[in-house]
Structure formats: structure tokens, C-alpha cells
Amino acid sequence: EPPLAQQIEALGETVDYLIARQVQVTVVLLPTRRGFFEFTLPNAYRGQVKVLCERRAVRCVDLSHLLEEDEFWDINHSNWRGLQKTHQAMMDIVEPHLRRNGLLD
């Protein structure tokens, strides 16, 4: 796995590529188990992603605290309830865009 700086640089390049092509970009930080918030790397990643988005005026939606512990199947994958909750949150983010572009009734 590449170091965090390389991951953030690659994300920045991807966002820049999309913006240059006039794509409306939204970055979503997915649900994470509470235990991961005790570690330096996940917190640094989340923080650097938010800074990257702020600097590029890109919407960043942080769903990292969305799920309860009993909504995970294993160390970091949601179970059925967690998946339904995550799906609804993602649809709440994308639905206005899909409607504006005639992709949903």
C-alpha cells in the first residue's frame, strides 16, 4: 500500500482531472467502526481528504460515524442493516443530481 501522501496526491490528481472535465465531484468518506478512530493513519487520511476537498472547493460528505457497531459484519464491512443505511445515505447525496439530469423520475 502506498504511503498516505501518495494516496492523497493520487486522489488530488483524480479530482483535478474530473474538475477539468466539468464533472461535479463529491467525495464520500464511508462508515468506519469506532475502533479505527483510535488509530493515527485513518484519522490522518480523513483529515487530509477533507483538506484536499476544501482547497478544491469540492463537497466532502463524512459518513464515517453513520453506523452503529452492530451494523458491521466484520472488522470494517457493514452487515445488511448497515448496508441499507449506507445505501440510503448515498442515495440522499446523489439523488438530486440524478433528478436534475433526468436520470430519475
Image (tube, rainbow, N blue to C red):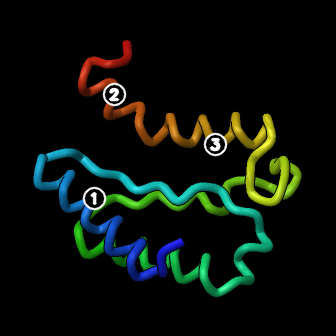
Q: Amino acid at mark 1?
A: Thr
SS at badge 2: helix
The earlier-in-sequence mark between 2 and 1 is: 1
Q: Compared to 43, does 85 lie above or below?
A: above
Q: Amino acid at mark 3?
A: Thr
**Relative horizontal placement of residue 1, taking residue 99 as reference (left or right):** right
Q: Residue at x 51, y 76 (%)?
A: 45
Give the x, y percent position of residue 85.
68, 40
Q: CA distance from mark 2 to mark 3?
A: 18 Å
Count of numbered circles on the image: 3
Would you name the residue on which mark 2 appears?
A: 98
- Report the front residue among 90 and 45: 45
Residue reaching furthest to the right: 70
Q: Quadrant of the N terminus?
A: bottom right
Q: Is residue 6 above or below residue 56?
A: below
Tell which residue pokes out farthest to the bottom in this image.
Answer: 40
Mark 2 touches mark 1? (CB < 8 Å): no
Q: Quadrant of the C terminus?
A: top left
Tag shown at residue 86: 3
Residue 25 is situated, as x and y percent measured from the top left of the image, at 29, 51
From the image, tell me which residue sits under label 1.
14
Going from N to C along the chain, the mark reached first, 1 or 3, is 1
Q: Is residue 38 visible?
A: yes
Say above or below: 10 vs 26: below
The residues bearing labels 1 and 3 have C-alpha atoms spaced at a distance of 24 Å
Which label lies toward us, 1 or 3?
A: 1
Element assignment for label 1: helix
Q: Which percent across, then down, holds residue 54?
A: 31, 72
Q: At x 84% / y 47%, what residue is drawn?
A: 73
